[in-house]
Image (cartoon, rainbow, N blue to C red):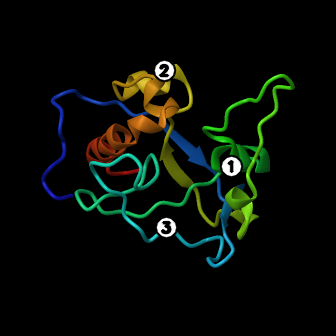
Amino acid sequence: MTGLFPMTSLELHPVRHVIPAGTELWRVHNVRYAPHLFNPKLADPFEFKDGSRFDGTRLDPYHCLYLGDTPTTALAESVLRSRPFELPAGRRRIPYVTVVGRCLSVLRTRCDLVLVSLIEAKDLAAVCQESTLLEDERNYVSARRWASEIRAQAPDV
């Protein structure tokens, strides 16, 4: 850490979640990159459009690998997020440019992964947050800062 964190005097109590060795996890990624490679790019710490929700920044440099527990989750997070439902059928149109050059891959963990859970309201409350942290792309800058705060207060994950 660079000394910028912790940024709050709040004491966080992250809920740990263990993904056992041998678990299959899914990823949508650019075909130019192997499925197991972490994103080498750091997000902008101040601009929400440059990077993803929990990417590392130059203020807290670490690299991310976004995975889902099912193929549907991986696809929903990568291609459905922020796509409106169209009237009258209530379907979402996915532009070709969104999927061209991307593929769906499955990875298997080699060891137990200890993560911080942000799935349920109680998990978010344990880190002094609520669902807005996860729901709105305009919150990406704040989410990146909170990810760094959680990392600072839970260095074992």
Residue 35: image x %, image y %?
Answer: 66, 71
Q: Mark 2 points at which residue?
A: 122
**Gap in angstroms between the C-alphas marked 3 and 2:** 29 Å
Q: Do the residues labelled 3 and 2 touch (CB within 8 Å)?
A: no
Residue 14, image quadrant:
top left
- Farthest residue to the right: give it: 89
> In front: mark 3 or mark 1?
1
Amino acid type, callout 1? Val
Amino acid type, callout 3? Asn
**Gap in angstroms between the C-alphas marked 1 and 2:** 27 Å
First in sequence: mark 3 vs mark 1: 3
Residue 79 numbered tag: 1
Left of 101 or right of it: where is 7?
left
- Callout 1 secondary element: helix
First in sequence: mark 3 vs mark 2: 3
Left of 41 or right of it: where is 154?
left
Compare residues 38 and 101 and report the one nearer the observer: 101
Q: Is residue 20 above or below residue 32?
A: above
Residue at 78% across, 50% down:
71
Residue 54: image x %, image y %?
Answer: 43, 48
Residue 124: image x %, image y %?
Answer: 44, 26
Q: Residues within 10 Å of mark 3 (few under 14, many from 20)?
A: some
Q: Mark 3 points at which residue?
A: 39
Residue at 61% across, 71% down:
36
| Numbered label tally | 3
Residue 100, image quadrant:
bottom right
Amino acid type, callout 2? Lys
